[in-house]
Image (tube, grey):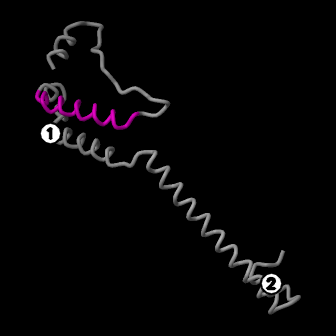
Amino acid sequence: MEELEENKDKKGKKPKVNRPELMGGFLNVSEYCERSRVWQHKFVEDMALFQSKDPSLDAAFASGWLVAIETLEAFESDEVMMDYLGEKTDFVNRQRKVVLGLANELEFYVRKAFPDDERILFEFGFCH
């Protein structure tokens, strides 16, 4: 925090802030969370200084910040979610094949039971 006080006295220069960099167009979430924890911890250590500038920067703010970090950390990674979605898509595709096979069997038996009855075929959705 001493750096902030020193930089405050220097007119025209803002303190350099190390922000997370984008990696491949996506933010590296784990690194961002790690840095956010450091920033939040530093904020807590120097909360009195921050509160002297803005009273709303209090313990509740620090607690909310930490909750936001923990919430972000709880999200599954893109890779995990892509794997999960891939598994579910494969399951849906397998089940669709089963259902379509059963529908074809049903059509066979409906046509056999009601030959040349377009109304019944229409009711079952087999009329073109």
Quarter of the image where the C terminus is located: bottom right
Q: Could you say whether the residue bearing mark 1 is in a helix, strand or loop? A: helix
The residue to which callout 2 is attached is 121
Tell me, yes or no, whether the highlighted magenta stretch contains residue 115.
Answer: no
Q: Earlier in the sequence, mark 2 or mark 1?
A: 1
Please state the horizontal and vertical placement of residue 90, each as a whole percent of the image.
57, 60
Residue farthest toward the bottom in the current orientation of the protein: 113
**Magenta span includes 47:** yes
The amino acid beneath tag 2 is Leu
Quarter-of-image position of residue 62: top left
Of the pair 28 and 93, the residue shown nearer to us: 93
SS at mark 2 in the image: helix
Quarter of image, res 58: top left
How far apart marks 2 and 1 lie (CA) works out to: 70 Å
Q: Give left or right: position of 58 versus 97.
A: left
Magenta region: which residues? 28-48
| Amino acid type for the residue under numbered disc 1 | Ala
Q: Please tell me which residue is depicted at 40% across the width and 26% down the height of the picture.
A: 21
